[in-house]
Image (tube, rainbow, N blue to C red):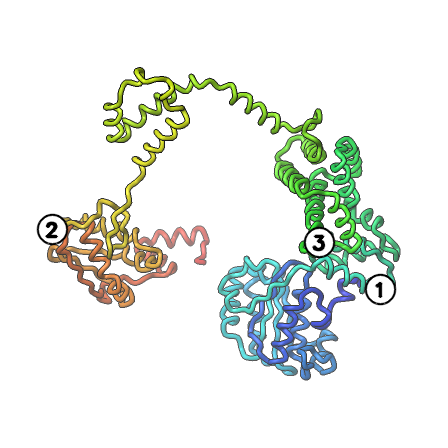
Amino acid sequence: MEYIVSARKYRPTSFDTVVGQQALTTTLKNAVSSGKLAHAYLFCGPRGVGKTTCARIFAKAINCMSPTANGEACGQCESCQAFNEQRSFNIFELDAASNNSVEHIKTLMEQTRIPPQVGKYKVFIIDEVHMLSTAAFNAFLKTLEEPPAHVIFILATTEKHKILPTILSRCQIYDFERMTVRDTIDHLKKVAQQENITVEEEALAVIAEKADGGMRDALSIFDQAASFCQGNITYQKVIEDLNVLDADNYFRIIDLALENKAMDIMVLLNNVINKGFDGGLLIQGLAKHVRNVLMARDAQTLPLLEVSDQQRERYQQQAQKCQIPFLYQALRLINQCDINYRQSSNKRLLVELTLIEIAQITQPDDCVGSGRKPRRLKSLFKQLTSTVQPKKAAPQVAAAERVVPSTTPTSTTSTASAPNPSSQSASKRPTLKSTVSMSFKNVLQNTRPKKMTVIPGTFDASDPNAAPKDEEHTFSQQDLELQWMLMCNRMPQKLSGIATRMKNMNPVITDFPNVEVTADNQVALDQLEQIKGSIIATLKTYLHNKAITLSLCLADKEEVAPILSRREQYEQMEKENPSIAKLRELLNLELA
């Protein structure tokens, strides 16, 4: 009998057998039962989570002649049997990774014109659709926008960000989630039961974590472990086969750190490195372990642990020994080591120092060699500050007092009228702290910018030089164009569209001080009419002329220059300069 891998043998054939995607499968079943089907669907998500499988199940249910009440295919009609026997002419699959050219898409589009002979719809499943070229996407876009009534497209991809936004806007998007460790373990238990394989739940938890949320990867690893273990999958054999670092090492490191046994941790680290594991891998695993211990301290965060039931109990037992400050400090040290690991020239020494610091977190401060360098520096600074002589502050006071007269006129008067400081008693002299704080307080208060005058009706009221004046100042065409451009730049974000159009307009002084502006189209003219009052107020303010008036008019069709495409621009350049055509022929260039 031919051997079939578990990923193919136990591939779901109905929506109810899909693992970990209950929300999506419920939505698709409701769409089938109600008959409200879109013309294009996009299934996106990581690898091995059931995108193509759900696309096939959905295509089978769409064409089923007698679907069940909950939206599943019956499996008995001619359409379902043809699909099961892989002879259906209504369901087409295209691998866009190898068929990504324009010709392949055009061939596919030609098949959409033929209505189905058996069934209701023609379903086209395009896998890895992000691999299509830009030209193929453009060829596919028109058909996707207005497909025939009997055609439904199902696109599948792992990289949604590479698909054109015009394609995304025409599809119903379904985001598939990663498989949780719990769902993966439960599914592997069912597979092991059907294959008559005895398993340990801790071994399945290792396989689920190694799969990283992909069910196909989990089944492939399961087959590998089953071949190695010969029908009895145990935890020790799985970590040996997959070359995974044993979680017992992390539990031992934390237990030894709580007892301040740094040397024992160094021996454990040496054994781990001798087995071929990298120190960075140990740090990453230890960070995840400490995080799990922190989550196990509270019943609210206990569901966040994606581990087996036995491992959860071990985490809870160790969490009772660890205090929260210890866990926080350990996470900070491990995270800092992970950040500096790649840049370190002596990676093993960095890991060793980090583990030593973790082992010294709970060590008393007065112990010799505790490594509490910041605490010693803090006590040293206290001794230094206590020996500071107040006489040394006199030059600083004088310097601070000299700052104030040079900054504010009021302080100059007060300083000149004050008596000589040498005639005052030493007891009345202000201290360094009070004098410096008062001096700099005065400086900050006098150098603080004044509040700008608000000019109503203008686009910008932050310029103090733009205050309106009752005068009729004469301005030139150059002044008008300058203030017009500055006004466009100052306009608020909600008027950015009309501001961009106004930058292409040229205001003209027709009869001073009347200003005339010509709009290219009626839309721009209507937008200018809405803000005409603000434009006039701004020009009056910044050109200092209260008699300015504004006239708006629409340009004639002959005056509006047509917008040429790139091909039209190139053809115009060829007419003006025939050498460009010769250069194109010599280089054998084609227009894109």
Percent across and percent down for residue 202 are 80, 53
User: Is 231 situated left or right of 291 in this image?
Assistant: right
Quadrant of the rendered image containing residue 287: top right
User: Is 546 situated left or right of 155 in this image?
Assistant: left
Of pointers 2 and 3, the one earlier in the residue sequence: 3
Which tag is nearer the camera, tag 2 or tag 3? 3
- What residue sits right under mark 3 in the picture? 305
Q: Residue at x 63, y 80 (%)?
A: 33
Percent across and percent down for residue 381 are 55, 24
Circle 2 sits in a helix, a strand or a loop, which is it?
A: loop
Q: Type of residue at label 3? A: Leu
Closer to the camera in the image, 265 or 26:
265
Quadrant of the rendered image containing residue 358: top right
- Name the disc covering residue 472, or none: 2
Circle 1 sits in a helix, a strand or a loop, which is it?
A: helix
Residue 559 seen anywhere in this rendered image of the structure: yes
